[in-house]
């Protein structure tokens, strides 16, 4: 069952101690826009899955992140959200992994769910047809000592 969240309100993600991102909902429009991001289109032919995953995560984050807490420059001054800042933030491995798990994976899990076939009405094999020939005669059970 797909559960719809009709509020479409932004939410805060706690990605690391002291680091929170306020993100908008993960919508089809956001994902389609991210896929068309120039950084993804400029990837070389045959780019690795890792390079594609990082480029896609950054493209999604640049569109989704509305605000953040706990992000500062090299001397600790709080900095505003910017595309460059988002890209730099996602270069930090634990932050990238947390963003992928808490935000992007929601969309991927939902995408995977739609590819599952529903079970047959009376069980998983109810719709299957038999292909083995029937046994010629009954066989006695094995003797037990």
Image: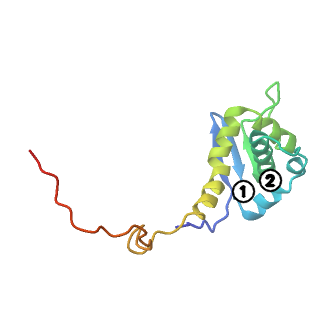
Q: For mark 2, what is the residue?
A: 63
Q: In the drawing, does residue 16 fall left or right of residue 39?
A: left
- Residue displayed at 67% across by 61% down: 9
Tell me the residue at 89%/44% (across/down): 44
User: What is the secondary structure assignment of the residue under circle 1?
Assistant: loop
Of marks 2 and 1, which one's residue comes earlier in the chain?
Answer: 1
**How packed is label 2: few (under 14 Cα within 10 Å), some, or many (20 or more)?**
some
Q: Decide which of 111, 72 is in the foreground and name it.
A: 111
Element marked by disc 2:
helix
Q: Nearer the viewer, residue 113 or 124?
A: 124
Question: How far across and down, in percent of the image, does residue 142 sit?
Answer: 16, 52
Q: Quadrant of residue 110?
A: bottom right
Indicate whether 46 appears above or below 113. Answer: above
- Left or right, 83 with respect to 19, comes to right
Q: How many marks?
A: 2
Left or right, 60 with reference to 45: left
Residue 26 left/right relative to 141: right
Q: Quadrant of residue 46?
A: top right
Instruction: Give neighbour class at mark 1: few <14, some 14-19, many 20+ (Cα, 10 Å).
Output: some
* Quarter of the figure with the C terminus: top left
Q: Position of residue 141 (x, y in %)?
A: 16, 57
Task: Look at the picture and state if 142 lies above or below 77.
Answer: below
Q: Residue 83: horizontal and vertical position, in percent? A: 86, 44
Q: Are marks 2 and 1 in contact (CB under 8 Å)?
A: yes
Q: Which residue is mark 1?
A: 24
Distance, label 2 to label 1, CA atoms, is 8 Å
Residue 48 in view, yes or no? yes
Q: Is residue 131 above or below residue 105?
A: below
């Amino acid at each position: 069952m797909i559960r719809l969240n009709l509020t479409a309100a932004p939410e805060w993600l706690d990605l690391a101690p002291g680091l929170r991102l306020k993100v908008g909902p993960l919508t089809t429009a956001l994902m389609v826009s991210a896929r068309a991001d120039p950084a993804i289109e400029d990837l070389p032919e045959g780019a690795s899955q890792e390079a594609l995953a990082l480029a896609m995560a950054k493209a999604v984050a640049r569109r989704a992140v509305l605000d953040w807490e706990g992000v500062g420059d090299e001397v600790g001054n709080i900095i505003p959200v910017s595309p460059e800042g988002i890209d730099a933030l996602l270069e930090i491995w634990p932050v990238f992994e947390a963003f992928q798990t808490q935000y992007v994976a929601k969309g991927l899990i939902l995408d995977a769910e739609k590819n599952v076939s529903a079970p047959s009405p009376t069980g998983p094999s109810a719709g299957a047809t038999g292909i083995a020939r029937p046994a010629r005669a009954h066989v006695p059970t094995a003797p037990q000592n």
